[in-house]
Every structure is written in structure tokens, then in C-alpha cells.
Image: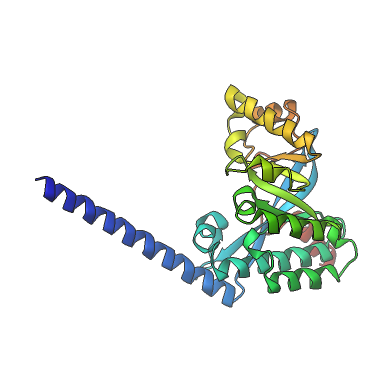
Amino acid sequence: MANMSKEMTGGARNALDHAVQSRDANIMDMVRRAIKHRQVLLAFQPVVQAGAFNRVAFYEGLIRVLDETGRVIPAAEFIGAVEDTEYGRLLDCLALDMGLKELARVPDLRLSINMSARSVGYKKWMNTLNRGLKQDPTIAERLILEITEQSAMTIPELVVSFMDDLQMRGITFAMDDFGAGYTALRHFKDFSFDVLKIDGTFARGISTDPDNQVLVSAMVKIAEQFDMFTVAEFVENEQDALTLQALGLNCLQGYYFGAPVVRPHWREDRDLKQA
């Protein structure tokens, strides 16, 4: 009976592994097709000032791909499968290219774009950046590049050098998903991030979670020590927003203030003027 149980357990594990591999293969195929046919777009989500919820500090441009039916697929459903691959680098290039073009079209827009630390040193990504910055001398100071804490820690020395070079050109850097990874404080002191985006797991439900209130308060103090601007992600209701405001956050982001949209208001305003 014990051997039979082991065989059944092994069979179930093999079936699960096969299912995961099939899913990842399907995701890779979907992303490959989307990149080939440029069926990729940005969705824009506002990041508001904590002291005035009706004032937008900047927008985050979130990568989306379209599947074969034209359905918009959010990054959470594919980024994990492709981040370590060439497709991940190509998606970073496309996101940056679209973000830079949007900044060129909208002179008062400030926009953050996500990238992986694995794109540091990727020639096509840097060529995309240099080409985009030439469009308008104000673009660099309106561009924010977001790198997740976990990604930055894979190659901290290269990220530090990369950031130093681009900050001299006026670009701002944000550490995304802070608290979700395992930042070694000895490396954290070397980083020169301008913005600290606190992972949404700490913000969600924080109004009734004293432990997370203490943790977020500590993160805010760390950010203040290193002259970093703070943003809380995944803010979904007024109570959490007010709690985060009281804890000293500079900005807030989440569905309470607006969902990511592929047709932001400035495009609608431009269409109306052209009509």
C-alpha cells in the first residue's frame, strides 16, 4: 500500500509538472505572437498625492499583450514565465518605446515604466532609450524607471552603476514592490533610488492591521533617511488611503483612485480637439 501511495503521489506530481510546463509553453507562444505582430500596449494608472487625492503626481505605464482573440492580458498572467527570457527583454524594449512616445506626445505627462534588471546592458533597450530621449529635451526628467526589489538584487553592482549613469541624464528611478523581496541592507545603502514603492501586500487592509502599520511606518522612516519619495501600491478603499496618509506616505496608487486604462483622458481630450 505504501508503494502504491508513493506511485500515486509521484503520478500526481508529474501531472502537475506537465500542466505547468504546458501552461508556460502556451504563455510563451502567446507573448511571442504578440511581440511579432506588435500586439502590445500600455495601460495607464494614476499615482496621486497623499495630501490631495485629486492631484496626480505621475502615471504608471503597465505592459499588456493581446491574445489571439484580442483580449487584453495583464502582466501578472505572463511576466513570470517570460521575465528571464529574451521575450522579457523585448517586452521591456516595447514598453519603454511606447512610454517614450507617449511622453513626446504629451508634454505635461510624467510617466513610470517598468523594466527588469536583466535589461541592464541590453543593447536594444539602451538604443530605444537614446532614440526616445532625442525627441524632446524634457523627456528624461519626466521619465521614471521602475525596477523591482527582487530584480535589482540579482545584479546589485550593475544596477547601481546603471542608475548613476542615467540619473546624470535626469531620469528618476523607483524601487518597486519593496518589502516583497530580500534586500540586503548593505546593498540598499549603495542604491540611489529616488522613489520607494511599498509592496501592495502591506497596504491592502492596513487600516485594520496594526502589524502592517508598524512595518509601513518603518519603511517610511528608511525612505526618509535616504531621501526617497514613498508610494504605497494596491490602495483599494478610503480607510486604507487615510491610514497611509497618516503614516506619512507621499503618494498612493490603486483601484481606489483609478484602474489602469488603455485610453487615458489625455488621449480622449486630443481626439475631441481633432474631431
Q: How is the image coloured?
A: rainbow
Instruction: Please identify the quadrant where the N terminus is shown.
Output: top left
* In this view, 205 is above or below 94: above
Q: Residue at x 63, y 48 (%)?
A: 149
The image quarter containing residue 243 is: top right
- State the image coordinates of residue 105 (x, y, percent, origin top left): 83, 65
Q: Is residue 15 visible?
A: yes
- State the image coordinates of residue 136 (x, y, percent, origin top left): 88, 67
Q: Nearer the viewer, residue 237 or 29?
A: 29
Q: Tag count in the figure?
A: 0
- State the image coordinates of residue 87 (x, y, percent, origin top left): 56, 69
Does 2 sit left or right of 30 as displayed?
left
- State the image coordinates of residue 227 (x, y, percent, origin top left): 81, 39
Instruction: Please identify the quadrant where the C terminus is shown.
Output: bottom right
* In this view, 50 is above or below 7: above
* In this view, 84 is above or below 55: below
Q: Nearer the viewer, residue 103 or 124?
A: 124
Does 134 sit left or right of 11 as displayed?
right
The image quarter containing residue 180 is: top right
Q: Is residue 258 visible?
A: no
Q: Residue at x 66, y 39 (%)?
A: 256
Q: Residue at x 38, y 63 (%)?
A: 21
Residue found farthest to the left? 1
Residue found farthest to the bottom? 36
Residue found farthest to the front? 186
